[in-house]
Image: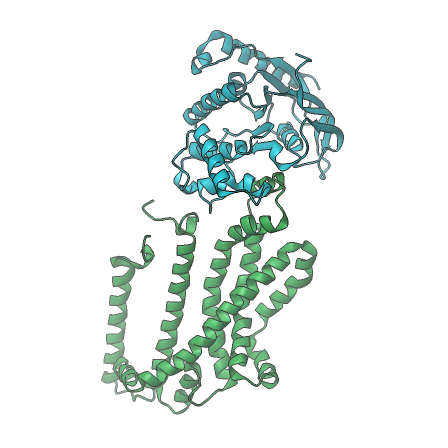
Chain colours: A green, B cyan
């Protein structure tokens, strides 16, 4: 197996952005010190690092809560999105009838639905899960549907020629054809699930030891502990990045033998 | 032609009008004898591929009948498309065994392996069972496609311009290999092409079709003795026959 995607390796791809980042941080720290900006207005990188070392365990606990919701919402979105897309692909009539509702999920700002969900559902985890799922599910539906419809027509003829039944056509032709599209949708959904979770946490206003990282960020900012808030922000960004890399690697691994998107560059 | 030979497929006054209203075929009648190699040649859009798809049962004729000499079932027909049409996510072996699996989900692994190996051997690809289509050249992919078409031991092999997308060198090589396979096994082959030279080289009989709406304007035997070899292409007789087929093309164009 060819290990981590080559895209993330090499001087141009890794070293340059890192050097740029370090330069940026240095300038930031210098500016904060030079102009004597107080920490509750703009904390410098050093102050943020201090917040990390002081509240690390606490923040990680928050991250775990956020991550749980995000991953659960993503898995749920992957399953329900794929099943829904498959149902839509069964007939033009079903698609015409139901697809507008999928679009409705996509275009509705989830913040506006949050108050209702909070009233109807008592379990906070479930509230967050529902909202994050709503944010994440559409790309899976729409991409998988596109994939199911773009199976090679000649291969469809071939399956028809050999009298393949619906089950055989679905499992041996439609699902593999849709896989690259499904994975593409999942990559988008990963980011959206995290955004959905963060928004949901901020709206649902959870507190206490079981609160997620976004709620803690909000709390810290209310108390003008901007270094701690920034530390939360950095962790959330890193989480988004890791999520993307994980999904990208998964996609690359599953498609490594056959799809153009996973073709080795030297091949 | 030899009336005593059994017909593999009989096409009787078949027409095809697409749902768009385009008349693809005006009445066509054709009898393909068992064990024969017949080519359908004609310009693009003359309905030769449509005729082939109707013989395969992939499209229904608008009128007329097509009768086949075997009981209906998935194993009667081998079809080779213009593109290799392989499943890119499946290995060579998985692609070739697909027709067997679809037709008979309970087939044993041993039987599958035997049939797949046999078919791959015929097309000269033994040892490539674990390769993915991406790793093969265009010519090799087409060989896999042919192996998949013959793995069910079909009663008729339908080939829809299978070599049109290949470079000339590969195309000649595959022509020669197909010819050798046919001479050895005497499959019934209905071969669609727009290359006169390819048709003359391979076939016992050439059916020339007119531009749309397609109909048969000439039906000529190709009298070269079997076995043929690649050297045939360099003979005067070969060039003369190509010219005759070409003339039939011209005649077809002249008649409204």
Residue farthest to the top, as pictured? B236
Above or below for B183 versus B114? above
Q: Which of A92 and B185 lies nearest the eye of the viewer?
A: B185
Identity of the residue drawn at 64% across and 62% down = A99
Give above or below for B12 relative to A64. above
Q: Quadrant of residue A15?
A: bottom left
Give the residue displayed 29% in from the left and 59% down from the top. A13
The quarter holding residue A115 reads bottom right
Residue A109 vertical placement versus A4 (above, below): below
Q: Nearer the viewer, residue B172 or A15?
A: B172
Front one among B242 and A161:
A161
Answer left or right for A32 relative to A157.
Answer: left
Residue B149 appears in the figure: yes
Residue B123 in sight in this render: no
The residue under the point 50% across, 54% down is A179
Q: Between residues A252 and B91, which one lies in front from this camera angle? A: B91
Residue at image coords 54%, 80% = A127
Residue B224 on image: x %, y %: 53, 10
Is B192 on the left or on the right of A35, as rendered?
A: right
Q: Examine the rendered structure and indicate whether residue B129 appears above or below residue A76.
A: above
Whole-percent x, y for residue A117 in the image: 59, 81
Q: Quadrant of the C terminus of chain A?
A: top left
- x, y percent for residue B85: 52, 39
């Amino acid at each position: 197996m060819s290990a981590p995607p080559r895209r993330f390796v090499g001087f141009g791809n890794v070293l340059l952005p890192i050097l740029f980042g370090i330069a940026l941080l240095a300038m930031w720290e210098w500016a904060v010190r030079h102009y004597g900006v107080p920490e509750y207005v703009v904390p410098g990188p050093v102050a943020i690092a201090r917040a990390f070392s002081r509240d690390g365990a606490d923040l990680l606990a928050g991250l775990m809560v956020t991550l749980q919701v995000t991953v659960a919402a993503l898995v749920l979105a992957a399953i329900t999105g794929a099943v829904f897309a498959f149902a839509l692909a069964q007939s033009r009539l079903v698609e015409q009838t139901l697809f507008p509702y999928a679009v409705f999920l996509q275009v509705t700002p989830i913040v506006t639905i949050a108050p209702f969900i909070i009233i109807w559902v008592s379990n906070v985890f479930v509230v967050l899960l529902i909202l994050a799922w709503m944010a994440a599910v559409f790309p899976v539906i729409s991409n998988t549907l596109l994939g199911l419809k773009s199976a090679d027509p000649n291969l469809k003829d071939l399956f028809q020629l050999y009298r393949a039944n619906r089950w055989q056509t679905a499992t041996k032709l439609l699902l593999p054809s849709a896989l690259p599209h499904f994975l593409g949708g999942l990559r988008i959904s990963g980011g959206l699930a995290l955004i959905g979770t963060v928004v949901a946490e901020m709206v649902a206003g959870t507190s206490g030891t079981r609160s997620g990282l976004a709620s803690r960020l909000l709390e810290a900012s209310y108390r003008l502990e901007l270094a701690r808030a920034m530390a939360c922000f950095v962790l959330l960004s890193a989480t988004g990045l890791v999520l993307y890399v994980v999904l990208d690697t998964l996609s690359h691994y599953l498609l490594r033998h056959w799809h153009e998107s996973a073709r080795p560059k030297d091949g | 032609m030899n009336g005593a030979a059994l017909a593999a497929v009989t096409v009787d006054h078949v027409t095809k009008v697409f749902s768009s209203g385009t008349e693809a075929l005006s009445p066509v009648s054709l009898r393909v004898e068992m064990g024969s190699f017949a080519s359908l040649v004609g310009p693009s859009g003359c309905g030769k591929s449509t005729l082939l798809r109707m013989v395969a049962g992939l499209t229904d004729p608008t009128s007329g009948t097509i009768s086949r000499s075997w009981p209906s079932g998935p194993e009667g027909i081998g079809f080779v498309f213009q593109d290799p049409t392989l499943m890119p996510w499946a290995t060579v072996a998985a692609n070739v065994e697909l027709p067997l699996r679809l037709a008979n989900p309970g087939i044993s692994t041993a039987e599958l392996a035997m049939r797949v190996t046999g078919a791959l051997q015929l097309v000269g690809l033994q040892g490539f069972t674990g390769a993915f289509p991406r790793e093969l050249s265009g010519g090799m992919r087409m060989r896999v496609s042919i192996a998949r078409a013959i793995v069910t031991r079909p009663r008729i092999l339908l080939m829809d311009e299978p070599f049109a997308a290949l470079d000339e060198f590969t195309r000649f090589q595959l022509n020669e290999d197909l010819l050798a396979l046919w001479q050895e096994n005497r499959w019934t082959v209905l071969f669609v092409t727009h290359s006169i030279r390819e048709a003359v080289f391979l076939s016992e009989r050439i059916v020339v079709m007119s531009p749309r709406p397609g109909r048969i304007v000439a039906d000529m035997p190709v009298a070269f003795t079997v076995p043929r070899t690649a050297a045939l292409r360099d003979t005067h007789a070969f060039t003369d026959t190509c010219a005759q087929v070409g003339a039939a093309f011209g005649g077809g164009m002249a008649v409204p």
